[in-house]
Image (tube, coloured by chain):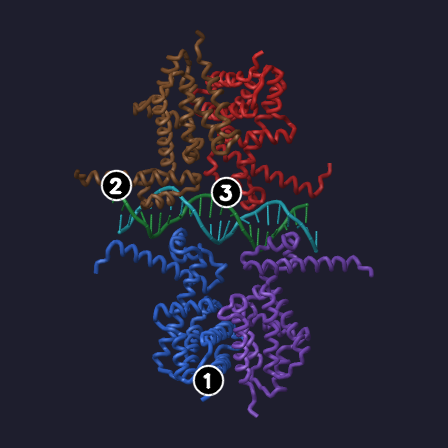
Chain colours: A purple, B blue, C red, D brown, E cyan, F green
Amino acid sequence: MVISMKSKIIENKKIKENNLLQAAFNLFTKEDITNVSVNDIVKNAGVAKGTFYLYFKDKYQIRDILIQKEAHRLFEEAHKQLEKNDIRNFEDSVIFLINQVLIRLENNPLILKFVERNLSWGVFHTQLNTAIDNDSFNLIKEFNEIATANGYEFENSEVILYLIVELTGSTCYNSILHSQPLPIEEYKPILFDSIRAILSQGKKKS
Amino acid sequence: MVISMKSKIIENKKIKENNLLQAAFNLFTKEDITNVSVNDIVKNAGVAKGTFYLYFKDKYQIRDILIQKEAHRLFEEAHKQLEKNDIRNFEDSVIFLINQVLIRLENNPLILKFVERNLSWGVFHTQLNTAIDNDSFNLIKEFNEIATANGYEFENSEVILYLIVELTGSTCYNSILHSQPLPIEEYKPILFDSIRAILSQGKKKS
Amino acid sequence: MVISMKSKIIENKKIKENNLLQAAFNLFTKEDITNVSVNDIVKNAGVAKGTFYLYFKDKYQIRDILIQKEAHRLFEEAHKQLEKNDIRNFEDSVIFLINQVLIRLENNPLILKFVERNLSWGVFHTQLNTAIDNDSFNLIKEFNEIATANGYEFENSEVILYLIVELTGSTCYNSILHSQPLPIEEYKPILFDSIRAILSQGKKKS
Amino acid sequence: MVISMKSKIIENKKIKENNLLQAAFNLFTKEDITNVSVNDIVKNAGVAKGTFYLYFKDKYQIRDILIQKEAHRLFEEAHKQLEKNDIRNFEDSVIFLINQVLIRLENNPLILKFVERNLSWGVFHTQLNTAIDNDSFNLIKEFNEIATANGYEFENSEVILYLIVELTGSTCYNSILHSQPLPIEEYKPILFDSIRAILSQGKKKS
DNA sequence: GATGAATGAGACTTCATTCAT
DNA sequence: TATGAATGAAGTCTCATTCAT
């Protein structure tokens, strides 16, 4: 297949951009963002300093893009597993999904360290929205569907979901990286019980 | 009362140190710490640049001291209120305590912005320990006492407490400052219900 | 002649570097290096502060480069004169060479003050080695050749040469600059006699 | 014996001054003077910062005093040995004296490192003058006396002496500390031969 | 589009010196 | 005398950003 001049250039641009993103990711996982200079990034990406500014406003923009990407991938993969395993019980589904994400983070603390405590409302919300746009999967919609199908009803399901994500994110960060207050394997049962307790609020009395 | 010459100097030192702490606090609540220079701090404190380094290693040390102080004050004041109000029911006590802290944060978002998400395990744990040392109040011990008195029993009460603090901290930050996912007044009922759900796990079947 | 764009940049860089070297030289001859700041250098060179660090690690590196250059030039010029004057007697050659260097230093005490007492083994040795590399002239080799041709023989000619250079350097510095212990013109005969006495040790008895 | 208040104070002052001198000496042998702050000195001396300025103008004055002292001690001790050994031959006397100084420096490289290349005309000259004042010993006078007694005659004996001291000082520094151009034991014979050659210029033809 | 040399503001830190106590 | 807290000028160095090529 012949590749036209134009597409070659576009391809080249994409490579440059990816190099920059990859280089930034590598550095951000090793060092705090304040200790990573644009210089470091371009040197690791193998491009000139000026090139950086052709693609990104500053290093903070590059960080946000990376968080966005990682968060999306994390949820998408977890979601794929959920579909594969045909779990239908509501509480089990939620726990399964969370557990899938946690397993990925345990196996790749770099991502965890990078996303750090940034898996906050901002990113979560954006993630949900992009998910809707991309039509790849819509967490909230699905959450509601499975909930309803299992006889659960929430006044504000989005908030409940957010609350669970935040609880998980903020506590598991220290648990995975520093085993505080407990190692992740010991902490999980307590966390999952608490999540089930929160979810059970929505159980309809029938 | 006669103040000796020496105590005059000591007094003066204390004033300088407080000026620096106060100035740093004011700036940190307005700006991210990376945008606050030692220069800014000393200018606001009305002391010379070199004086800063007589009292603190760098701006990060001053930040840590401030967080420590604020966290302590927050809990202590909330606790005082709890004692005043003679609330004995277990779940009510916990919720009351949390609500007291939240009310203070709502009224002073600056502190919230400053403490930010730093009210994490590290600070929480230190807080508990210092509390024990100071003998001023021991949160965990009290938590356990009230729990037991009300027929609750937790395998790992420290973790449960931590979990609740993290859940509250990470979600209320955005709620108070950005009304996301909901304004704090609308969010509180949902949060409190969830906390009660978590606590109810420890309820002994009698 | 067409100068490509790239060479224009390279040319420009060379100019900047030279400006910095020249500015540093001027300042170092006026003031002790501890009293010369990078700020002073860049101001005199007409470049920005950051530019300095594009070319040199610190002011000490710039000093070393300058000493190296000056020492080289001094010896090279003296050597040229030696060749021009076709002096063949061994002792006369050495004295002539030294005298040439001294004359240059007398006429330019700034260089002397700058090089100061740094014309030591380190620089001398480096100079000899670079000379070998550059193939411009090899002092030791020549020293030996003329010596042998004139019936002199030294067990360790390099050390003898070093000894003479050090003797000259350390005494003439004060003589030229402070006329101590004697003004240079009065000191020279004594120095030269001493050097001849040292050299005469190598005279073969025939 | 009763010590009066006044002498106690004077004694105390002397202790403070000595502490400062000793502390400075220790630091100057470890670090370049530019890297030794007044703060370091007073901390090591166990006195307050302000006290330093009651005794010395700045750290450079303290350095000069120390060099003065060390140089004096060095020559005095060497001189004592000379008298003990009853060496009468002129050249032998000079070599003996120099060798005594070198032996002391070999055994105490700290002093060497400290005096470094400061054993220059300035200090040497001052040393000769102070020696005359103190009447402890007069190097030049003695040099002349022994020379004359042995049938040597110098037009400018002070300069010859200076020349020898400089030659020795500037070359032996690197020889002792860095074994360059040769280790001191290998270098000494060459140096001593050269000194004898210089001295032999003064030998009267009889 | 890509480059990378140049910029210069500004961050952090040290330190000699003063002076009230 | 002795102290040591306070000063603030001055130093080194970094880095995001621009712009001529």
Q: Is residue A47 visible?
A: yes
Give the residue type that dot 1 points to.
Lys
Rounded to the nearest whole Å, what is the CA distance between mark 2 and mark 1? 75 Å
Give the residue type that dot 2 points to.
Asn
Whether residue A91 is situated above or below residue C151 in the rendered picture: below
Task: Identify the residue under disc 2.
Answer: D12
Judge by depth and name the residue closer to the eye, C13 or C113: C113
SS at circle 1: loop
x, y percentage for residue C135?
Answer: 65, 28
Q: Are marks 2 and 1 on the same chain?
A: no
Q: Are marks 1 and 3 on the same chain?
A: no
Judge by depth and name the residue closer to the eye, B92 or A16: B92
**Residue, x 36% and y 36% (percent of image)?**
D62
Taking the image as shown, residue D131 lies to the left or right of residue D155, namely left
Whether residue C41 is situated above or below residue B129 in the rendered picture: above
x, y percentage for residue A20?
Answer: 65, 58
Asked if disc 2 and disc 3 are in contact, CB closer than 8 Å, the reply is no
Q: Quadrant of residue D137?
A: top left
The image's mark for residue C39 is 3
Q: Nearer the viewer, mark 2 or mark 1?
A: 1
Whether residue B187 is situated above or below residue D89 in the rendered picture: below
- Chain under callout 1: B
Rounded to the nearest whole Å, what is the CA distance between mark 2 and mark 3? 45 Å
